[in-house]
Image (cartoon, helix red, strand yellow):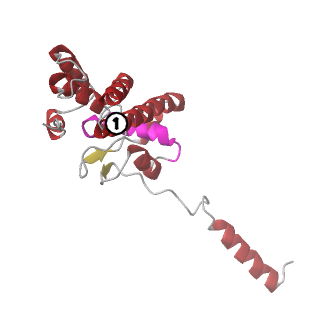
Amino acid sequence: MLNIKSRYAAVLLLGCFCSLPGSAQDKPAAVPSTYVLKRGDSVLAISQHIRYPKATVNQMAYAIIHANLDALGQRTTEVWRAGATLSIPDEATVLKTDTKTADAYIARVVKSDARYREAVALEQKGDMKGAVAAYLDAAKIGHVLADLRLGQLYDTDRTKTLPHDLQESIRHYQKARARGLTIEEAERRGVREKP
């Protein structure tokens, strides 16, 4: 039989275990059905923050990207419009995609984002040959903004890195549209070349 001090110690010890992270008291917050994008958000950070307990971050990101092509684009984790509201898929929809498929898809998305950012940096430094190669790589992987930029460059490349080729320009614009780029977003991201 426990004496008073032992009972008190047992109650304190039990109280400590019950309040440890991951215990039954720490239920995950409910996943919202919508999420308002903020400047600096990324799909992976959002997915980490609001994912369902049974889903991986990549499964959540995969589902969010496919549910919100108008705000994100099919092959980018970049957030295009701060203030836009993302639709958050339900748990069954998220778990419908197996982890292997989600992991492979998100790996391609991350790679295309990296190549696109590299292309933009090279273009800003004046290395158009390197920028075009990186834009082409990103577009092959499926980056919608790389296709948009290539469409612009084939149409009006004042650096003469790419030939003026309306068919190639149209092909890249069409690929960007098929990947979820709207006309409004394309206009917002219009050609910003130096005269």
| Residue matched to label 1 | 122
Q: What span is in magenta? A: 53-71
Residue 115 is situated, as x and y percent measured from the top left of the image, at 39, 33
**Where is residue 116 drawn, in percent x and y?**
35, 34
Q: Taking 28 as reference, is 55 above or below it?
A: above
**Crowding near pointer 1: few (<14 within 10 Å), some, many (20+)?**
some
Q: Is residue 141 left or right of residue 16?
A: left
> Is residue 109 highlighted in magenta?
no
Residue depicted at x 80% and y 85%: 5
Q: Secondary structure under badge 1?
A: helix
Residue 66's x, y, as percent? 34, 33
Q: Quadrant of the N terminus?
A: bottom right
Answer left or right for 91 relative to 86. Answer: right
Query: In the displayed image of the protein, which residue is found farthest to the bottom?
Result: 4
Q: Residue at x 71, y 70 (%)?
A: 14
Q: Is residue 172 left or right of residue 25?
A: left
- Which residue is nearer to you in this view: 59 or 7? 59
Of helix, strand and loop, which mostly describes the magenta segment?
helix
Camera sees residue 31: yes
Q: How many marks?
A: 1
Residue 46, placed above or below residue 24: above
